[in-house]
Amino acid sequence: MGTFRISGPICAAAAVLAVAAGVAAAGNANPEDWSPRLAVVSGEPPSQAAARMEPFRAALGEALRAEAEILVLKDAASQVEAIASGRANYAAISATAFALAQELCACLEALAVARASGGETAFREVLVARGDGPADIASLKGKRIAAARAGGFGGLDVAMAALTEAGVVEAPDAATILLVPSSEAAFARLASGEADAAVSWMPASAGSAGEGTKPALAGAIPGLRVIWRSVEIPHRLHAVRKDAPDAMKRRLREFLTGLYSAVPGAYDAIEPDFGGGFVAARQGQVEPLIGIVRALRGADGR
């Protein structure tokens, strides 16, 4: 593989820019006229996902004194389109999809971010290698890199942006990208010697010796070390369109940051991965990712 092209969310979402540009701003509108239309991505059948998230929908509607709706979508491209066009006005969204939406329409405001049980609110994509393997990202030219297939713009794209910048995926001595079903499979390729490096992740505050990178598998790889780390990537964000009434933004942020202790069942229904509750988000947390998205779109000719 000599080059790497991003597709899916970027291509699909770019088509809605004209629509998004025509959605009028209404940040000071009457809060009573605003009701949450939440866009979420799920691999479950929509009816099943909606049933699972019903405790959250009910708690949300009660807290905001509004009729709440959940729009279940199949992928990040559909979610970005729904937000950019105004079909949805609220999203539980990955940080990378948030960055894409911001690059396309600058229409989202982050309110809260999910916290892990250990207190982390962000992670990093990493490239890991064996102790006798490549020492840094530049050393990956001509090597084999195992990475989990991504269903849309995400960690693999962040890692590929760094590899492209380092000249690792350019001909004639390009690295070979081995796409595998999961991070576990990528580590298995690394452990067996079929790959010289693997794309993985670690908590944002972890060190450089591989802690946090799938420890059950990492322990089987002698001298495992991290040879590249991405910028911090926040956990899943809850964000609204900027044209939401300011009063509703405040109510929604207060609802989210108090949800874990007030209605734990509703929290679990909307946030299955991070067990530490929501904390207030900062818009600046995603700025580095927006720069990466901009570079990727430019490199891909869009």
Image (spheres, helix red, strand yellow):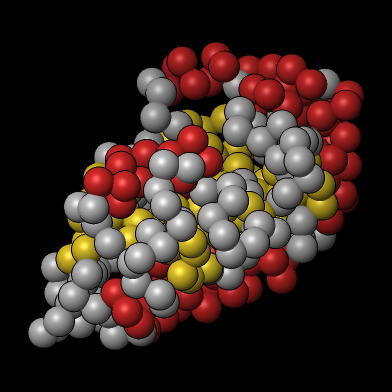
Q: Find residue 44 and report its image quarter.
A: top left
Q: Residue at x 49, y 21 (%)?
A: 49
Q: Residue at x 75, y 36 (%)?
A: 117
Q: Locate residue 43 relative to residue 123 in the image: left or right.
A: left
In the image, residue 166 lies at what x, y percent? 35, 84
Would residue 18 be seen by someone viewing this image from the given angle?
no
In the image, residue 158 lies at what x, y percent? 43, 66
In the image, residue 237 lies at what x, y percent? 65, 49
Q: Nearer the viewer, residue 36 or 13?
A: 13
Q: Residue furthest left?
A: 172
Q: Nearer the viewer, residue 178 or 153?
A: 178
Quadrant into which the N terminus falls: bottom left
Q: Residue at x 74, y 17 (%)?
A: 265
Q: Residue at x 48, y 70 (%)?
A: 228
Measured along the vertical axis of the image, is residue 247 above or below residue 1? above
In the image, residue 101 lies at what x, y percent? 51, 62
Q: Nearer the viewer, residue 183 or 257?
A: 183
Quadrant into which the C terminus falls: bottom left
Measured along the vertical axis of the image, is residue 59 above or below residue 102? above
